[in-house]
Amino acid sequence: MKQFRHKDIIALRDLTKEEIELLLETAESMREINSRDIKKVPTLRGRTIINLFYEASTRTRTSFEIAGKRLSADTVNITTSSSSTTKGETLSDTALNLLAMKPDIIVMRHSVSGSHYFLSKKMPNCSVINAGDGTHEHPSQGLLDMLTMKDRFGRLDGLKVAIVGDITHSRVARSNIQGLTKMGSQVFVAGPPTMVPPGVEKLGNVIACATMKEAIQDADVVMMLRIQQERQGKTLMPNAREYARYYGLNPVNLKMAKPDAMVMHPGPINRGVEMSSYVVDGDQSHILKQVENGVAVRMSMLYHVCSGEIE
Amino acid sequence: MGADSTVIMDGAGVRRALTRIAHEIIERNKGITKIALVGIRTGGVYIAREIATRLHDIEGERLPVGEVDITLYRDDFKGHSLHLPVGKTDIPFSVEGKIVVLVDDVLFTGRTIRAALDAIMDHGRPAAIQLAVLVDRGHRELPIRADFVGRNVPTSLKENIAVLFDSEGLPTEVILGK
C-alpha cells in the first residue's frame, strides 16, 4: 500500500514517484467533494491552518483556503501588508509567535528560496507546505499541472512537455521539471537566453532549446510562463512586443505542436505578451481546468501532511 | 488459509443469502421503485452489485449502484500515524427522497456505518436509509443495527471474518479466522 510519510511538502524534488502518484490519486478522489451540493467533509475538523503569504497571491491563497475549509479545517490568512512584518519582525520570530498559537499546518509563500526548510526546522510539530518560495519551487502548482495533464492523456509517462518563458525566475518551471521528470515525461524548455539558466539540464530529463519552435515542435503540452515583471530589472528583455514576437504563443506557432496539444499557463496571464488572447480563450486552453484542479490537489496535500507520520 | 480458519459460508450459501436479502428488500419496501443501492468500498460495493443483479432478475428493473468511500469520515483519523489512501466516492444519482439501501460485507463495531451515513447525508436527504450486510459479527460500539442480514455469526474479539471475492468481484466464501 502506498504511504505518505512526510511532515512537510516543500519541494517535489524531495518526493518519490510513488508519493507524487499518491498525491495525484488522492486529488482525483477529492474532486468528487467539489462537485457536490455540500462541499465539505469532516476530515480535518479541529485542525488549524495558517496561510502565511509574504508575496501577493489570489489564486494560490484562495485555493488553499477553500481546500482547507472543504476538509473542515479552520483557516486563517496572514498577508504581510497587514502583519508585523511591516513593523520589522523577522521570519524566525513570526514563526515562533505563530507556533505559540498551536497551528497544525502553515502554508507559506515567501520570496526567499529555501525559507520553508528554515521554517520547518523551527516547528517540529507543525507541517509546512510550500506555496511558492523565491525561484525554487511551487509544488502545489506542479502537482495540479500534472493532474491536469493526467486527466487529458491518462498518463504522464512519455509525454513531451514544452515550457516556454522565463525559466530562470520560475518556480513553476522547477516544480514541473522535478515532478514530470520523475513521472517519465520529457521536458523541453525555451526562452530568451537571459531567462534560461545555464545547467538547466541537470535538474532532470530536460532539454534546453535554442528557439521556441524547437521546444514546441510535436509537443503534447505547451506550458507558457508568465513574464514576471516584479522579479526582474528591465534588462532581461528589450520590451514586451519583442518578447511576444519571439516567445509568445499564438494560433500560428501553436500549430507546430501536436494537433491535440494542450495549452497551460499558471496565471496570472499577461494577455498579448506570453500568449495571445486567441490561445488563452481557445479550445486547446486548459487554464481554468488547472485552477479547478488546484483545489483538489491542495486538499490532497493538506490531507497527506496531516496523516503522514512525523519524520 | 491456516488450520485455524473455517469456512462459515460457501459460495452457494452466500448466493442464497443474497437472494433472500433481495426478496426481503422488495417485500419491506413493496417494490423497488424508490430504492437506491450504495455499497461501502470495497467489499460492500461487490455485495451491492450482486443484490442489484438479483433485484433485476426478480423485478425486471436495473438499479444503479453507488459507491461510498468512508476514509474522509473516519472517527479514528487522528490516531492513524500512517496515511490511509482515499478511494473514490461515486454516487451517480440523487439520493434526495430515495430509500437508500446501504450495503457492506461485514457489520462489526458500526463505526464504518456511522461514517457512511454521514457521507450519504452530505449528498442529500434520503427518505430513509436501510442497512444490508452479508455477515453481522456483533460487538457493536454504536447504536446501529442491520435491516437485512445474510448470516449472524457470533464471534469473539480475537477472531476475524473475511469475505473473499473472485477476480470478477463475485463473493466466493466467508471465512472465520482465529
Image (tube, coloured by chain):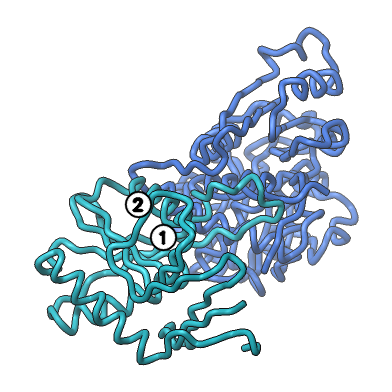
Q: Residue at horizontal 15%, vertical 65%?
A: B28
Q: Residue B175 location in percent, x, y?
A: 52, 82
Mark 1 vs 2: CB contact within 8 A: yes
Q: Is residue A189 left or right of residue B74?
A: right
- Residue A184's quadrant in the figure? bottom right
- Chain A: drawing colour: blue
- Residue B15's quadrant in the figure? bottom left
Question: At label 2, which amino acid type do we have?
Answer: Ile
Question: At label 1, which amino acid type do we have?
Answer: Val
In this rendering, the answer to whether B9 lies above or below A92 is below
Q: Residues within 10 Å of mark 2 (few under 14, many from 20)?
A: many
Mark before the other along the chain sequence, 1 or 2? 1
* Disc 1 from disc 2: Cα separation: 8 Å
* Residue assigned mark 1: B68
Which element type, helix, strand or loop, lies under badge 2?
A: helix
Q: Residue A306 location in percent, x, y?
A: 67, 44
In this rendering, the answer to whether B175 lies above or below A142 is below
Q: Residue furthest left?
A: B30
Q: Are marks 1 and 2 on the same chain?
A: yes
Residue A182: image tag: none
Frontmost residue, A60 versus A73: A73
* Residue assigned mark 2: B120
In this rendering, the answer to whether A72 lies above or below A163 is above
Residue B88 appears in the rendering: yes
Which element type, helix, strand or loop, lies under badge 1?
A: strand
Q: Residues within 10 Å of mark 1 (few under 14, many from 20)?
A: many
Frontmost residue, A295 versus B36: B36
Q: Residue A206 location in percent, x, y?
A: 79, 63
- Chain B: drawing colour: cyan
Residue A174 appears in the rendering: no
Q: Is residue A193 left or right of residue B60?
A: right
